[in-house]
Image (cartoon, rainbow, N blue to C red):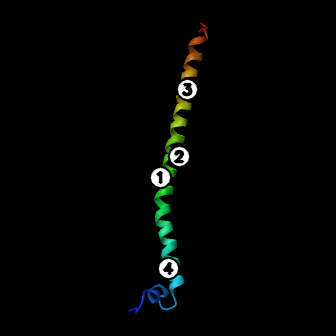
Amino acid sequence: MYWNSFSEFLAMGSHGLYVWGSVGVMTVAMILEPVLLIKGQKELISRLKRQFRAERSEQRVGRNADRATPSQG
């Protein structure tokens, strides 16, 4: 297709709203996808670190409790 002016290019033969709307939606999706993936990865890593610290502290408490009780024998 050939256009005589920039406004004709933007109009895209009366399909401009559909074309440029689609380009806009795709651009937003292409920008948001990696941003949301990185955010989710950071949240997952922090949640796993918290869980690991909680499990490690529970193990320490369990070991200290075992040492504190006298053995019966």
**56 or 29: nearer the eye?**
29
Q: Name the residue under label 3.
A: 57
Residue shown at 40%/93% (left/top)?
4
Q: Indicate the quadrant where residue 69 lies.
A: top right
Q: Residue 20 carries which label?
A: 4
**16 or 46: nearer the eye?**
16
Mark 4 crowd level (few <14, some 14–19, many ≥20, 10 Å Cα): some
Cα–Cα span, label 1 and label 3: 29 Å
Q: Which amino acid does label 2 sit on?
A: Glu
Task: Count up the numbered dots.
Answer: 4
Cα–Cα span, label 4 and label 2: 34 Å
Discs 1, 3 touching: Cβ within 8 Å: no
Mark 1 crowd level (few <14, some 14–19, many ≥20, 10 Å Cα): few
Mark 2 crowd level (few <14, some 14–19, many ≥20, 10 Å Cα): few
Q: Is residue 8 above or below residue 64?
A: below
Report helix, strand or loop for mark 2. helix
Residue shown at 58%/21% (left/top)?
61
Q: In this view, does 30 lie above or below 9?
A: above
Q: Mark 2 points at which residue?
A: 43
Report helix, strand or loop for mark 4. helix
Marks 1 and 2, the one that precedes in the sequence:
1
Marks 4 and 3, the one that precedes in the sequence:
4
Mark in front: 4 vs 3: 4
Q: Position of residue 68 (x, y in %)?
A: 59, 11
Q: Indicate the quadrant where residue 9 lies.
A: bottom left
Q: Where is residue 50 in the image (x, y as percent from the top left)?
A: 54, 36
Q: Mark 1 points at which residue?
A: 38
Q: Which amino acid does label 4 sit on?
A: Trp
